[in-house]
């Protein structure tokens, strides 16, 4: 029995760091992007903390990976280490989709009032980040439009080369990729906020069971959620604008 416990702990100790490093880092790099991916991104887009850090993904990853590894260790698999690493990576992917906002408010706030306020605070934080990124993206796009216009004019006059057009295309493509990643994270957070809103109301017995003050809190939260959606739509418009500029260069990818 003692040997089985030692074996269990040995496999757990080996599998957990590997699974977390492989699964969580892979998923976080997919969200945040590698340095090479964003080498050509306009630095202004990433200034003043105007980007999301996938905190929710990291927490969800660790939780999902842990559950996957535990299931493997309790199974009849002959190679528990290999099974645990694979399960940890897969569990990470599943855990990344967990609703971190709802889990957080349920764990740390005990009244409907507190839970709605905490959900609103998270949405307000994400809204400010998205607004800042949207504003910077519009400024960057306006500058790039002028640069593309000048570059095309110089190319027609023989003052710029095909290589110059391709370099600008790479910069525009990097901006599109960066903004698309940030938009996707904002959408994930918006979906989590909506689920948290509905979960808190459901836990309270439904909308009709809410006190007047909490109904007012829900209306305030709904307005904030709508504003966040509007900012995400604005980011999408900027991404479309960048793609239009790429098309105007007529450079093959």
Image (spheres, rainbow, N blue to C red):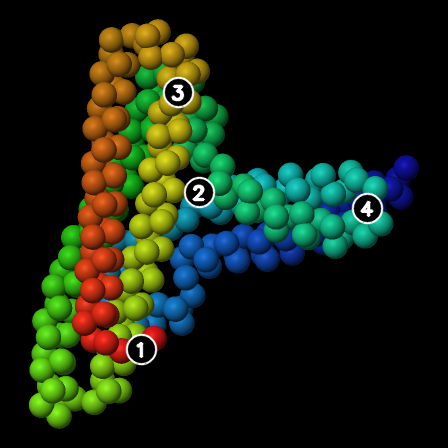
Discs 1/2, front: 1
Q: What is the spatial separation of the Cα atoms under label 3 and label 1, in whole angstroms?
A: 50 Å
| Closer-to-camera residue (128/167) | 167
Q: Secondary structure at mark 3?
A: helix
Query: In this picture, is 206 found above or below 78?
Result: above
Residue sitting at 16 percent across and 53 percent down? 135
- Residue receiving disc 2: 56
Residue sitting at 47 percent across and 30 percent down? 103
Mark 4 neighbour class, 10 Å CA radius: few under 14, some 14 to 19, many 20 or more: few
Q: What is the spatial separation of the Cα atoms under label 1 and label 2, in whole angstroms?
A: 37 Å
Q: Earlier in the sequence, mark 3 or mark 1?
A: 3
Q: Which picture quadrant has residue 100? A: top left
Is residue 108 visible from the viewing direction of this image?
Answer: no
Query: In this picture, is 168 found above or below 53?
Result: below
Mark 3 neighbour class, 10 Å CA radius: few under 14, some 14 to 19, many 20 or more: many
Q: Residue 234 placed where, x, y %?
A: 20, 48
Query: In this picture, is 84 found above or below 143?
Result: above
Q: Which picture quadrant has residue 248? A: bottom left
Which of the image's four quarters has the C terminus? Answer: bottom left
Disc number for residue 77: 4
Q: Earlier in the sequence, mark 4 or mark 3?
A: 4
Disc number for residue 252: 1
Q: Residue 3 placed where, x, y %?
A: 89, 44
Which of the image's four quarters has the N terminus? Answer: top right
Q: Earlier in the sequence, mark 3 or mark 2?
A: 2
Q: What is the spatial separation of the Cα atoms under label 2 and label 4, in whole angstroms?
A: 31 Å
Q: Secondary structure at mark 4?
A: loop
Q: What is the spatial separation of the Cα atoms under label 4 and label 3, in whole angstroms?
A: 40 Å
Q: Residue 243 placed where, x, y %?
A: 24, 64
């Amino acid at each position: 029995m003692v040997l089985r416990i030692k074996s269990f702990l040995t496999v757990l100790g080996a599998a957990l760091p590997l699974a977390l490093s492989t699964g969580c880092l892979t998923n976080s790099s997919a969200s945040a992007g590698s340095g090479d991916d964003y080498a050509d991104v306009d630095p202004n887009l990433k200034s003043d903390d105007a980007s999301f850090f996938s905190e929710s993904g990291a927490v969800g990853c660790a939780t999902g990976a842990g559950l996957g590894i535990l299931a493997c260790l309790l199974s009849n698999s002959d190679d528990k280490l290999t099974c645990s690493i694979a399960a940890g990576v897969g569990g990470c992917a599943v855990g990344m989709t967990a609703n971190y906002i709802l889990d957080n408010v349920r764990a740390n706030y005990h009244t409907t009032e507190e839970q709605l306020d905490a959900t609103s605070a998270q949405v307000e934080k994400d809204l400010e980040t998205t607004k800042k990124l949207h504003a910077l993206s519009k400024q960057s796009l306006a500058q790039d439009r002028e640069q593309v216009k000048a570059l095309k004019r110089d190319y027609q006059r023989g003052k710029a080369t095909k290589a110059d057009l391709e370099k600008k295309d790479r910069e525009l493509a990097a901006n599109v990729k960066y903004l698309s990643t940030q938009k996707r994270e904002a959408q994930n957070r918006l979906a989590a906020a909506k689920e948290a809103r509905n979960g808190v109301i459901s836990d309270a017995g439904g909308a009709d069971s809410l006190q007047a003050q909490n109904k007012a809190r829900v209306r305030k939260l709904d307005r904030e959620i709508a504003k966040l959606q509007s900012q995400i739509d604005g980011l999408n418009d900027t991404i479309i604008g960048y793609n239009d500029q790429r098309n105007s260069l007529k450079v093959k990818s």
